[in-house]
Image (spheres, rainbow, N blue to C red):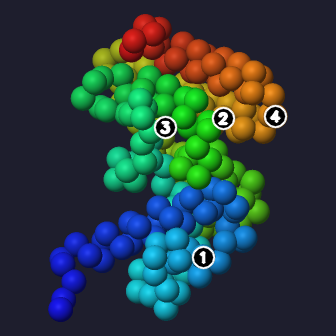
Amino acid sequence: MPYPPRHHDEVRTRIVRGAQRLFNRRGFEAVSIEEIMGAAGLTRGGFYRYFGSKSDLYAEAMDCFFTNPDCGNRWEGVTVDPSRGNVGAQIVRAYLSRQHYQDIEDSCPMVALPGDVARGGAKARRAYENALNAMIVHLQKDAGEAGRPDRPTALAIAALCIGGMVVARASDDIGLATEMREAAKSAALTLGGWHDPGA
C-alpha cells in the first residue's frame, strides 16, 4: 500500500525535530545517526532517503522556531503571531521567556549550540548565520515608515536575546538568571522602540 502524499515531508520533519532536541541537549558530535532515527521511531537505514549526511541534517536543525513557524515548537503562553503586530517585540519576549529558559531540548539552537558551531565546519557556521539572519529580518518587520529597528539596532537586539539567554543558562543562580533575562529583555525592547509593555 503506498504512503500518503505528505508522508515523506512529515517523516522528514519528525527527524529534524528529534535531531534538534538531541543536538540541543548533547551537541553534534555526541549524537549518532542511530539515536536520531530512533528518536523519530525509525531505523538508521532510512536516514539517507532524507538527508545526505548528519551535517546536512544539522544545518536544517539549526532553523529557529521563533523565525520559522514551520518548526512548530511553542510553549503555553508563548507565541509569535505576526497578525498581532510588533513582531520584533513578540520575538524578544518569547526569546527571553521563562519557558524558553527552562526548555533546553526545544530551545532555539542559536542559544544551545554556539560552542558546537564554533568547533564545527563551514556548513554548521553557514547554518548558524542563516538562522541569525532570519532572526534579524524578523526583528525588522516592524520598521515600516518609522525605520526602527534599523539593521544595526536589530543586530544589537539579536545579540541581547541570544547572549542574554546563553549567560542565563550558564548560571546556577536562578535569581541571577532571571535578572539577566529581564535586563536583556528590557534593553532589547527599548532599543527596538517597543516601550509599551503590551506591545
Compute the Cα span from label 4 to label 3. Answer: 30 Å
Characterize the local packing of mark 3: few (<14), some (14-19) or many (20 or more) Cα atoms within 10 angstroms.
many
Above or below residue 61? Residue 198 is: above
> What whole-number distance in Å separates the C-alpha atoms at marks 3 and 1?
33 Å
Residue 169 rendering spot, x and y as whole percentages: 72, 38
Q: Nearer the viewer, mark 2 or mark 3?
A: 2
Q: What element carries label 3?
A: helix
Amino acid found under the numbered disc labelled 3: Ile
Q: Mark 2 points at which residue?
A: 165
Q: What element carries label 2?
A: helix
Query: Which image quarter is the N terminus in?
Result: bottom left
CB under 8 Å between discs 1 and 4 = no
**Disc 3: which residue:** 136
Q: Which mark is residue 35?
A: 1
Element type where label 4 sits in the image = loop
Left or right: where 44 falls relative to 12:
right
Residue 39: % across, % down: 52, 71
Read off the residue under disc 4. Answer: 172
Compare marks 4 and 3 and give the one earlier in the sequence: 3
Q: Can residue 158 be seen in this view?
A: no
Lower position in the chain sequence, tag 2 or tag 1:
1
Tell me how far mark 2 sits from mark 4, CA to CA. Answer: 13 Å
Tag in front: 4 or 3: 4
Point 53% across, 77% down: residue: 38
Q: Are marks 3 and 1 in contact (CB under 8 Å)?
A: no
Alpha carbon separation for disc pair 2 and 1: 27 Å
Q: Report the front residue among 122 and 30.
A: 30
